[in-house]
Image (cartoon, rainbow, N blue to C red):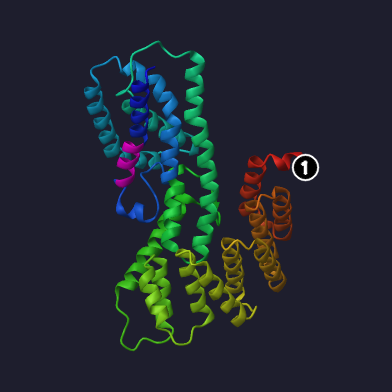
Amino acid sequence: MRLDDRLLLFAAGIAAVAVPGAAWHFTSGDERLALGLTAAPFAWPRLLVGHLVAALPLAFCSAGRIAMLGRPLHRAWAAAGLTLVLTLVMPTLADGLDQAKAGFTIRAVMRTILAVLVTTAWLSIAGRAGTAPAKWTWLASIIFALLPPLVYADRIAESRATDFLTFAKSDRLTRAMGTLEGLRDLGSDRRFTNKTVAELIPRLRKDLDRIAALVAKPLPAGATAEDKPARALNLLRLNRLAEAEAILNGLDAPTPETWMIRAALARETARWNDLETACRAVIDRADPNAKSTEMLEDAYEGLGEAQRKRQRPSDAAETYRIGAERLPNRAGYFRYLHGLLAADQGRPREALDAFADAVRLDPKLAPLVDPQARSVRTTSLSCLGR
């Protein structure tokens, strides 16, 4: 193949990923974009790009056949037209998958088909008719188009399931909704509080509509000290962060409850120093009684997260140890957090030991812990030899 042909093929490969990726992403709607989502059923942008890239070898095998038809300009118009058609029909396709209750694998195959179709069309612009690829080439290309995105989607689903729990626990309900929407796109069978993703979405949407109706009413002139933090919390739930922070900044005497709202805002805006400050304020002010146990647990968890993000893993481990000591009935959950920390630090054996301890201390944590332990076992070769 001549250098000019290689450059043309390289440019077509870039277009095969960039053009449909941009078209599908930026037409997915403002609401999905605000939540970090892309066009359904691809859920998140990185999975969309992953599918398009993984489809390129199979598209290259197929493009030679199409290159025998018409001129390059005609094939360019055809590729643009196919991209437009798929962009228009993708929402209907996603709805159909939801109504059919399509599972994880079926959705992955459908995403692969879409990616192969559109990348083949764009690669055909630079393609030239030639000898048919060998059978093993076809087989390897099909496996590459299917398997890596399937594994990647599984890893994303596990990660986002953990994110959902964090969002829901810290009252970031709009973000939690976006995560559920993405998990539905993937066909995740994960259950939370014994509810499926499909069952949780309408419940959470109803809660968000109710909260939006409350926020739509202006605060009365004689609003009490309790009314303002409650409104700030509702604004946080709706992801209206600037408005929530403006209310909190106007409060004279922050309580542990308002500090937790500040902590959630800091988490959302990745201000880890502010998160550490807010969580320490809660820990210093709250008592481990029946009303504040959950708040204290959230504060220790948030403090540990801030320390992890600020590259202080040993401090985070100590925070989880102290949290378990101060809240012995939640010791299992803190061991689970320690397991996540160890996994992030590349210590699979320590992570698996912590996960086992978490379930032993609190068997109810098994649905939360088991997927994380499975992920550590399947992704770390080092732990297999120990």
x, y percentage for residue 205? 39, 59
Give the residue at x 25% y 27%.
Answer: 76
As helix, strand or loop, the secondary structure at mark 1 comes to loop
Residue 108 screen position, x and y as percent? 46, 35
Question: Where, quadrant-wise, is the N terminus in this rendering?
Answer: top left
Residue in front for this viewpoint, 23 or 114: 23
Residue at screen point 65% across, 64% down: 316
For residue 95, above or below residue 58: below
| Quarter-of-image position of residue 122 | top left
Choose between 198 and 130: the one closer to the eye: 130
Q: Amino acid at mark 1?
A: Arg
Seen in the picture, residue 11 relative to 247 is either above or below; the reply is above
Location of residue 223 (image quadrant): bottom left
Specify whether residue 155 is in view: yes
Residue at label 1?
386
Question: Over which residues does the magenta segment extend?
Answer: 18-26
Q: Quadrant of the C terminus?
A: top right
